[in-house]
Image (tube, rainbow, N blue to C red):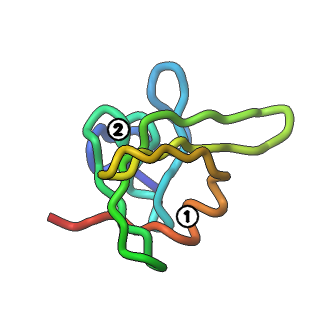
Amino acid sequence: MNRCKLCGCTDLYACKGGCFWVDKEKTICSSCAIINEVKFKNVVNGAIATIIDANYESYGMSATVTINYEDKRKFTISLFDFLYHYQEVKS
């Protein structure tokens, strides 16, 4: 079973208010990524970003994340694109 390494939520027991996985390994939930300002690296250009907002539309089965780059640029992208282009920065 997948478990968030920061708060312990799982596929069956999400965070209060809901959350979803923001890494391919399914070890970081969207709530913890925002609260803990987890850094992610764009694998294409090396830019570092944090997730500042995450939304899940259950009816459409789609999710988006809003990211903030270190230079303060903000973008909202699909979770699919985020999972494909970003990796957690290991400390």
Q: Quadrant of the C terminus?
A: bottom left
Q: Residue drawn at (21%, 67%), measured in percent from left and top?
A: 90
Query: Observer-nearest residue: 72 or 65?
Result: 72
> Residue 11: x percent and y percent?
54, 45
Which element is circle 2 on? Answer: helix
Of pointers 2 and 1, the one earlier in the residue sequence: 2
Residue for badge 2: 32
Q: State the residue lying farthest toward the bottom.
A: 44
> Residue 37: x percent and y percent?
28, 42
Q: Which mark is residue 83?
A: 1
Q: Residue drawn at (33%, 61%), measured in percent from left and top?
A: 48
- Callout 1 amino acid: Leu
Q: Residue drawn at (85%, 32%), measured in percent from left and top?
A: 59
Q: Relative to residue 29, is residue 1 depicted above or below?
A: below
Residue 43 falls in image quadrant: bottom left
For the residues marked 2 and 1, what is the alpha-carbon distance in whole angstroms? 16 Å
Residue 1 can be seen, yes or no: no
- Badge 2 density bin: few <14, some 14–19, many ≥20, Cα 10 Å: many
